[in-house]
Image (tube, helix red, strand yellow):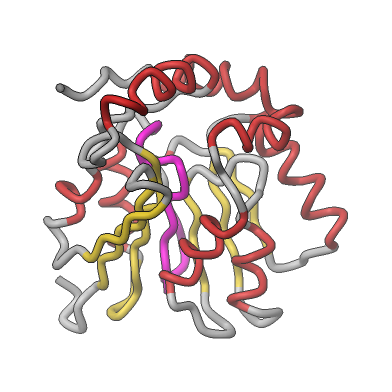
Amino acid sequence: MGSSAREPLQAITAQYDRVARFYALMEPLFLIFPPARRKAVAALDLSPGAVVLEVGAGTGRNLPYLVDAVGPAGAVIAVDASKGMLAEAQKLVGRRKWSNVQLLREDAAKLRVDRELDGVLFSLSYSVLPEPAAALEHAWEKMRPGARVVVMDVGLTDTRFRQVLAPIARLLTKLGPGDPYSRPWDDLRRYGSVRTERFLFGLYYVCVVVKSESGA
């Protein structure tokens, strides 16, 4: 079965703006639980003092794990195009009094980051972005040698339970935009060897690519 057409960025941000205040309550519908987020952040293999970029940060549900990973001497740059989602993330940053988190409202396909990065995370965002390969390319340019790109997402592309889960996936795409047949590993292979781990019946996956010491 072929890939779904991606919605334009304006339509995606409008949809997320509408659900931003209730997004945390919707997460159980998508089987998005803390262990999946911790698995994605752990795959980045960040050290204290690292600088990490999250593309499609949403309401900031990964920020506690990223801040813990980089420590007070590190920095977290969180990018999203949805004003509503970032407003919720800002509330979290304020409550936690994090001084090392920078929130940016940007189109990831046109992103310009002015710092070298030790890691880049796409958490449930690569399948949503209208131009994910462009976002990946911009992020890769700013990564240090040895840094990692991690994509944690959900999809039906290779799961054994595709026929059973397909009706559920169609319902979920009505609640939140996304391509259930996204193949991020095809884009990632341009940059190096891809390691992929699947979990939750193969519905979710974590893909990792490490930037070589040569910077290629």
Residue 162: percent from left, percent from top: 27, 31
Q: Is residue 43 above or below residue 128?
A: below
**Residue shown at 26%/60% (left/top)?**
196
Instruction: Confirm whether residue 49 shows in the render.
Output: yes
Q: Toward which corner of the image does residue 175 lie, by quadrant?
A: top right
Asked if residue 7 is among those painted magenta in the image, a careful observer would answer no
Q: Nearer the viewer, residue 131 or 184?
A: 184
Instruction: Confirm whether residue 110 shows in the render.
Output: no
Q: In the visual, does 123 lie left or right of 5?
A: right
Q: In the visual, does 20 lie left or right of 82?
A: right
Residue 36: percent from left, percent from top: 51, 56
Q: Quadrant of the C terminus?
A: bottom left
Q: In the visual, does 31 lie left or right of 144?
A: right
Q: Is residue 212 above or below residue 202?
A: below
Q: Nearer the viewer, residue 133 or 32?
A: 32
Residue 19: percent from left, percent from top: 67, 22
Please tell me how many numbered marks the rendered image carries. 0
Q: Is residue 119 above or below residue 155?
A: below
Q: Quadrant of the N terminus?
A: top left
Residues shaded magenta = 112-128
Asked if residue 127 is among those painted magenta in the image, a careful observer would answer yes
Residue 203: percent from left, percent from top: 36, 42
Q: Toward which corner of the image does residue 64 lie, by quadrant?
A: bottom right
**Residue shown at 67%/41% (left/top)?**
59
